[in-house]
Each structure stands twice: as structure tokens, then as C-alpha cells.
Image (spheres, rainbow, N blue to C red):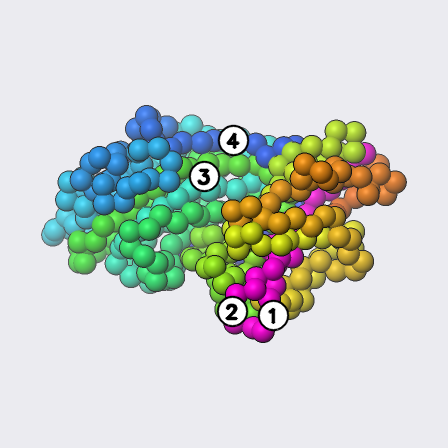
């Protein structure tokens, strides 16, 4: 392990809202369809196609027909006896994170099968590092943990990492893998796809231990951005936003996904902030006087506000937004009638907080 990488657990990030809010912006995107041209690979990192020997084991890929793979192509493990091995997939060109974005995050898909990888143990680290000085030093921001070993070994899983602390800076990313020794390296390894860095107009919140002890896979290290509690269809609902929350040009759209199919759902808003109160199979994250914005029936487990017959989200706020902005928190309450861990027949998403400007 390089001495300039801090392997301690990452403390919670303090997020400060900016008065300048823009639509969700893709700052970087790579599905490896053109190989590893945006990256500097070392060790066993190599481009993999869905038609290659190891790629075919994990096909179909989340995006396109190519991915990046830490393993020996054609052999489908990372065993190099009698020595250990390591390697990094390092971004070649820094990404500028706007100072004015409320939040920023890294998202990617991965499939992983390694020796007892933990955040604290001595073997087979697979982790994400960030550099703000062109790669001279690196800071560890996330790692795969024991929880990933409960996942289906051939499945792809999406991961999300908060990069809000790097607003106003240009950063390099690297995916680092280290076996630490030469033993038990005959497993599949690490494959990643659909890498994106996103800037977002709002802040997801209400990360809590759920009443049913349902946790997104890899929590809190990967998947650490807040999601709703698990529901009876085996998913974790997600509320997120896109657009501009300004009265003069209201393009804000809120979208909820991973609901039970055809679930009835209600978007709630609060001007009084957030708290955490047990509520059905999840948590009510809003406090104070709550306003019901609109009720929808999910289609394919998803719904969007405003819908075709809904007014803009700013309609009820026209007289309430001062020059300095108004913080509004949203959450979706939805039906989940199937038997689950409590007698309740409803659940909630994460909260989503934005600052409305005139």
C-alpha cells in the first residue's frame, strides 16, 4: 500500500448549499466503449469486451459492450504465483468540480469476486482514491467491504460516492486493487462499467438504519448516498432531482425510482427542515407542516413530479421565496401492501433538499 494513501474510514461530509443551482450535469462519463483511452492502467487492469472469455461471464454489461477489468484476460482470475499483485486504473485528465454545485458524486457499476475484502482487514483491497494535486498524493474515499460477499457473484451493482467535499477543485480518480499477498487470488476479480461524475441541484438526505435492518449492498462505503429503506420487492427507493429551482425559470423535476410496481405515491414538501421519525417500514425525514404536492401511481416502479397534469413545483412557493433563497425538503411516501417486516403497508424514499431562488 502506498504510504500517501489514508486508509482510515472517511468521516461524514459536511455539505453546504450554494445560492447558485443548476441542472444535473454530467461532468465525466465513460463506458469504456473506446477502450481505456481516458485512463492510465497498471497491473492487471485491461479493457474487456462482452464477447471476451471473462466478459462473457458477466455479460450483459450495464452500458454497451465493453468494461474495464482487473484480472487476467482469458483466465478470469488475478492469480500470479508466487507473488502478490496490484494495479490502479487512474484517470488521465482531471475533472473540474464546479464550486457552485450543491453536490457532486461518482457513480459506476461493478461486479466483484475477491478474497474476503474488508475495509479493515489485510487482504484484497478494492477501493477508490481521489487526488487534488495531479496524482502526487491520494486520499482514500471509499472501499468495498464484507457486505459485498453476500451478493450474487455474477451480478452487477451500482455504486455511488459523494464528491461534494471537492467542489471548486480539479480531481483525479483511481480504482486501486491490491492483493497484499500471493494466496487465494484465483477468484474472478473486479470489473467496472458506466463511470460518471455528476453535479446535482439538490442534496439527498435521511441516511439512517432502517426499521427492518435493510441496508443497500456495501453500505456505508459504496452506495453511501442516502436511499430509502428496503421494501417488499427487494429494492431501495431513490428520490433525486434535475433542473433549476428558480421562480423565474422553474425547470426542477423530481424523479422517484425503484418503487413497488404500480405503487400509489405522494410527494410531500416541508419548509421546516428535516428530522428522522420511524414511519411504516421506513422513516419520515421531514418535519413541521407538511404539504401534499401531488399523488401519482407509479409506472414500472417510477414516477415524476411535476407530472403532465401537475403545475410546476414552484407554484405554491411564489410568495414565500426571499432574495436569499428558501430551503425546501421533499420526500415521497408510497404504498407497499405486500407483507414485510412491520404491520405497516407503506414506506418512504430518501429526502431531497433544494434552495429555491427568486
Q: Earlier in the sequence, mark 3 or mark 1?
A: 3
Q: Which residue is at the front of the view, 29 or 119?
A: 29
Is residue 238 in view?
no
Residue highlighted by disc 2: 340
In three-dimensional space, the C-alpha distance between marks 3 and 1, rounded to whole angstroms, equals 46 Å
Q: Where is residue 128 shown, x and y percent of the image?
A: 40, 46
In three-dimensional space, the C-alpha distance between marks 2 and 4, rounded to whole angstroms, equals 39 Å
Neighbor class of circle 1 (other Cα within 10 Å; few <14, some 14-19, many 20+) is: some
Residue highlighted by disc 1: 344
Is residue 60 in view?
yes
Q: Nearer the viewer, mark 3 or mark 4?
A: 4
Q: Nearer the viewer, mark 2 or mark 3?
A: 2
Neighbor class of circle 3 (other Cα within 10 Å; few <14, some 14-19, many 20+) is: many
What secondary structure is found at the residue carrying circle 1? loop
Q: Earlier in the sequence, mark 4 or mark 1?
A: 4
| Residue 35 located within the stretch drawn in magenta | no
In three-dimensional space, the C-alpha distance between marks 2 and 3, rounded to whole angstroms, equals 43 Å
Q: Is residue 236 left or right of residue 332?
A: left
In three-dimensional space, the C-alpha distance between marks 1 and 2, rounded to whole angstroms, equals 8 Å
Task: Tell me whether circle 1 and circle 2 mark residues in contact (CB < 8 Å).
Answer: yes
In three-dimensional space, the C-alpha distance between marks 4 and 1, rounded to whole angstroms, equals 41 Å
Identify the image quadrant of residue 150: bottom left
Q: Earlier in the sequence, mark 2 or mark 4?
A: 4
Mark number displayed over residue 27: 4
Residue highlighted by disc 3: 131
Span shown in magenta: 330-358
Q: Earlier in the sequence, mark 2 or mark 3?
A: 3
Q: Which residue is at the front of the view, 9 or 75?
A: 75
Amino acid at each position: 500500500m502506498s504510504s500517501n494513501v489514508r486508509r482510515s474510514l472517511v468521516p461524514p461530509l459536511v455539505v453546504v448549499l450554494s445560492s447558485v443551482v443548476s441542472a444535473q450535469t454530467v461532468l465525466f462519463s465513460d463506458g469504456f466503449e473506446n477502450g481505456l483511452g481516458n485512463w492510465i492502467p497498471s497491473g492487471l487492469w485491461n479493457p474487456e469486451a462482452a464477447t471476451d472469455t471473462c466478459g462473457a461471464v458477466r455479460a450483459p454489461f450495464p452500458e454497451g459492450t465493453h468494461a474495464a477489468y482487473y484480472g487476467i484476460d482469458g483466465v478470469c482470475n488475478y492469480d500470479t504465483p508466487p507473488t502478490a499483485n496490484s494495479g490502479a486504473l487512474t484517470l488521465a485528465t482531471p475533472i473540474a468540480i464546479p464550486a457552485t454545485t450543491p453536490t457532486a458524486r461518482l457513480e459506476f457499476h461493478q461486479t466483484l469476486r475477491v478474497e474476503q475484502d474488508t475495509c479493515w482487514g489485510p487482504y484484497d483491497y478494492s477501493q477508490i482514491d481521489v487526488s487534488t494535486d495531479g496524482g502526487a498524493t491520494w486520499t482514500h474515499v471509499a472501499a468495498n467491504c464484507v457486505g459485498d460477499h453476500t451478493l450474487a457473484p455474477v451480478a452487477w451493482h451500482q455504486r455511488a460516492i459523494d464528491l461534494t467535499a471537492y467542489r471548486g477543485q480539479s480531481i483525479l480518480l483511481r480504482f486501486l486493487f491490491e492483493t497484499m499477498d500471493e494466496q487465494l487470488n484465483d477468484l474472478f476479480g473486479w470489473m467496472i462499467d458506466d463511470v460518471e461524475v455528476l453535479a446535482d441541484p439538490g442534496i439527498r438526505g435521511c441516511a439512517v438504519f432502517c426499521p427492518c435492518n435493510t441496508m443497500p449492498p456495501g453500505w456505508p462505503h459504496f452506495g453511501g448516498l442516502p436511499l430509502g429503506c428496503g421494501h417488499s420487492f427487494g429494492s431501495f427507493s431513490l428520490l433525486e432531482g434535475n433542473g433549476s429551482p428558480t421562480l423565474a425559470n422553474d425547470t426542477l423535476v423530481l424523479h422517484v425510482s425503484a418503487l413497488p410496481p404500480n405503487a400509489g405515491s405522494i410527494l410531500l414538501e416541508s419548509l421546516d427542515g428535516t428530522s428522522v421519525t420511524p414511519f411504516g417500514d421506513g422513516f419520515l425525514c421531514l418535519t413541521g407542516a407538511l404539504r401534499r404536492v401531488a399523488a401519482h401511481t407509479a409506472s414500472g416502479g417510477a414516477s415524476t413530479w411535476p407530472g403532465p397534469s401537475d403545475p410546476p413545483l414552484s407554484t405554491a412557493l411564489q410568495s414565500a421565496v426571499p432574495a436569499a433563497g428558501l430551503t425546501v425538503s421533499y420526500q415521497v411516501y408510497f404504498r407497499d401492501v405486500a407483507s414485510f417486516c412491520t404491520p405497516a403497508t407503506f414506506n418512504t424514499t430518501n429526502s431531497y433538499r433544494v434552495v429555491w431562488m427568486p
